[in-house]
Image (cartoon, rainbow, N blue to C red):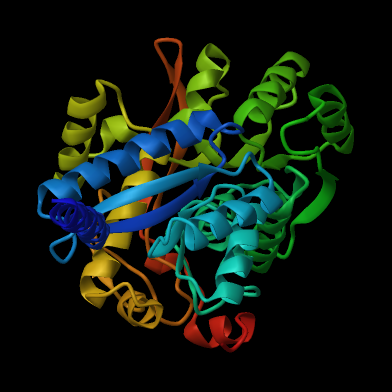
Amino acid sequence: MRRRYLLAAGLAIAAAGMTRTAFAEDVIKIGEINSYSLLPAFTEPYRKGWQLAVEEINAAGGVNGKKIAVVSKDDGGKPADAQTAANELVSSENVAMLTGTFLSNIGLAVSDFANQKKVFFLAAEPLTDAVTWSKGNKYTFRLRPSNYMQAAMLVEEAAKLPAKRWATIAPNYEYGQSAVAVFKKLLSEKRPDIQWVDEQWPPQGKIDAGPVVQAVAAANPEAILNVTFGPDLVKLVREGNTRGLFKGRQVVSFLTGEPEYLDPLKDETPEGWIVTGYPWYSIKTPEHDAFLKAYQAKYNDYPRLGSIVGYQTIKSAAAILAKAGSTDVEKMIAAAEGISLPSPFGEITFRKIDHQSTLGAFVGKTAQKDGKGIMVDAAYRKGSDYLPSDAEVEKLRPKD
């Protein structure tokens, strides 16, 4: 009796173990890292976006016959915490790849981790050009259009302005520094008559808008480049409106047309700024219509740009895994290089030469309607039209 009991117990334990193993083998885990507690205005819609993508992918049968599961961690806006999260996801959760990150310095930290540990990393949001160029590596790919791409889109319009005297305002960290440098370079190439008369570098998330506005006004520019976003942007606009900084001056601004940054401005929204953004209410394409319908049905809310980024990050990860037919890192890299896939903005490709996707952005102008900020005269700019030549990229990117 005792022997039969022990044998039955042993078989039960073995069966339980097999069930757990089978479950593990039937699920592909994707690691995801982002600054949820620091930047909820962007990252909460971003989370909703990737959750919708997971739901759609699994409802359609998953990837290579397996469900996908996203294991998410908050980096708190700290590069060291992001690397710790990455290590836990790889070593403890056994994720197939890493995705996400928002701030550029954090994206670079996780990219460095991926390079050292030979882990596939799909960067979602960080915009610094270094991610795919000067600090690029074979393990890192990036979804969003980079600073170079968005600067090139904005410069196309900025170069038409009569203004010759320009000032810049940007957060003093990797993203802001990179954006200002490339915008100045590209605009000066198109307009050698431009003078750069002032630069303001407030700390990210801690702008003291009064002195910044006063310093820019004292330099008497004819046009201003703004790179601030989030609460810093709200403070800058409020102080600038109060002190008349924007009257009679042209303003060109990264990201300001994104709903997560435009919505909080409400009736303080300055009119006529040239911006990149996401006018979800005026995009009329089958791809975007399908996304918008699914998003609103699930959340009873309108999408932000973060929603698009989160959605497309996981859709891209799934497409790469499906093409690779494996979670082997080298096979995923080979699959990702040159892969084309649909997005709410149309077809995109992850380029082999630098691992940058050709996802584009909308360029338009700020306006007010019913006491809210909106984008008008917006047009989609394909990312592939705003990237340097392969020969230039080869100079910018280290050899693997």
Q: In the rendered view, would you say 291 is above or below 1?
A: above
| Rendering quarter of residue 222 | top right
User: Which residue corresponds to the image point at 73% horizontal and 42% vertical from the top-left?
Assistant: 171
User: Does residue 42 appear left or right of residue 381 in this picture?
Assistant: right
Image coords of residue 277 (percent x, y):
45, 40
Q: In the rendered view, would you say 335 is above or below 247?
A: below
- Give the tally of numbered discs: 0
User: Which residue corresponds to the image point at 61% horizontal and 48% vertical from the top-left?
Assistant: 103
Residue extending farthest to the left is 60
Image coords of residue 57 (percent x, y):
18, 51
User: Which residue corresponds to the image point at 33% horizontal and 32% vertical from the top-left?
Assistant: 303
User: Which residue corresponds to the image point at 88% horizontal and 26% vertical from the top-left?
Assistant: 211
User: Does residue 296 appear left or right of residue 272 in this picture?
Assistant: left
Image coords of residue 219 (percent x, y):
87, 38
Q: Is residue 100 visible?
A: yes
Seen from the viewer's position, the closer of residues 108 and 87 is 87
Q: Quadrant of the C terminus?
A: bottom right
Image coords of residue 207 (percent x, y):
78, 30
